[in-house]
Amino acid sequence: MTYCVGVLLEEGMIFASDSRTNAGLDNIAKFSKMSVFERPGDRVIVMLSSGNLAGTQAVVSLLRQRCDSADAAANVLNATTMYDIARLVSDAMREIDRRDSPYLEENPAGFNASFILGGQVAGEPMRLFRIYAEGNFIEAGIDTTYFQTGEAKYGKPILDRVVRHDTLLTDAAKCVLVSFDSTMRSNLSVGMPIDMICYRRDELMVRMRRRFEEEDVYFRALSREWSRGTRRVFRRLPDLVW
């Protein structure tokens, strides 16, 4: 399983993903689910992946190969708009699906790869997309400020209560980390490390990127203070009158 979050704010964007791809008593694997395509001064593109690891890695590898190829007419680094980039990702997903489907017919999960795609191209506002396994996608806006993939239910309540379009980037980053803490407390299939990028509007380069490992001091303090604060608020709630 996995947990990924992309947030679109007035001030900027936040991307975060866990790194656990399998879980069990003696079988835990870790792979980064965050891919960055960057051309400083021109564009920052971030992809968060969920689903079958072989499928998502194949899509990302195909996109990178086309960026490195002089023969590729359209790729993530030369597309004109974020919408065009979303279409390129969708096309790559469908190409991998067509290639692998005959060999996955006996697997009920099938191709099973999806992405959160976001960023900014120079001359265009920031944009955020949720791309489904079928290759179709939706776009975030003022009323829909974030997308999740994977094990979303445990982290969703705190995002719904805190994150708005005008929420400060620093506050939203804390909220996203709390949503990961809540998810990991309730589901073994989501785990550290957590990769996070905070992007400020119009900077057109990644300046704030961090990986939170198991013993990260800040993350442990945040988790501890959130638990303490929640218990304090709970004790102040009015008692039920029968």
Image (spheres, rainbow, N blue to C red):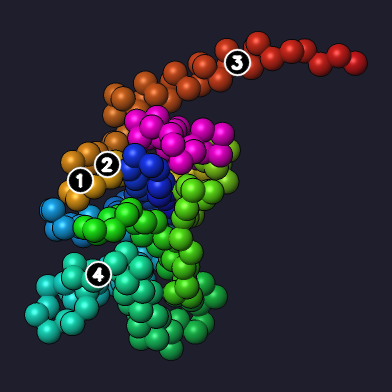
Q: For mark 1, give the secondary structure.
A: loop
- Mark on residue 200? 2
Q: Nearer the viewer, residue 140 or 189?
A: 140
Q: Position of residue 234 (x, y in %)?
A: 64, 17
Q: Which residues are magenta?
A: 159-185
Q: For mark 2, give the secondary structure.
A: strand
Question: Label 3 neighbourhood size at 10 Å, few (<14), some (14-19), many (20+)?
Answer: few
- Mark on residue 80? 4
Q: Quadrant of the C terminus?
A: top right
Q: Nearer the viewer, residue 238 or 137?
A: 137
Q: Pointers 1 and 2 in contact (CB under 8 A)?
A: yes
Amino acid type of disc 2?
Arg
Marks 1 and 4, the one that precedes in the sequence: 4
Amino acid type of disc 3?
Val
- Mark on residue 203? 1
Q: CA distance from mark 2 to mark 3?
A: 33 Å
Instruction: Check if residue 231 falls in the magenta segment.
Output: no
Q: CA distance from mark 1 to mark 2?
A: 6 Å
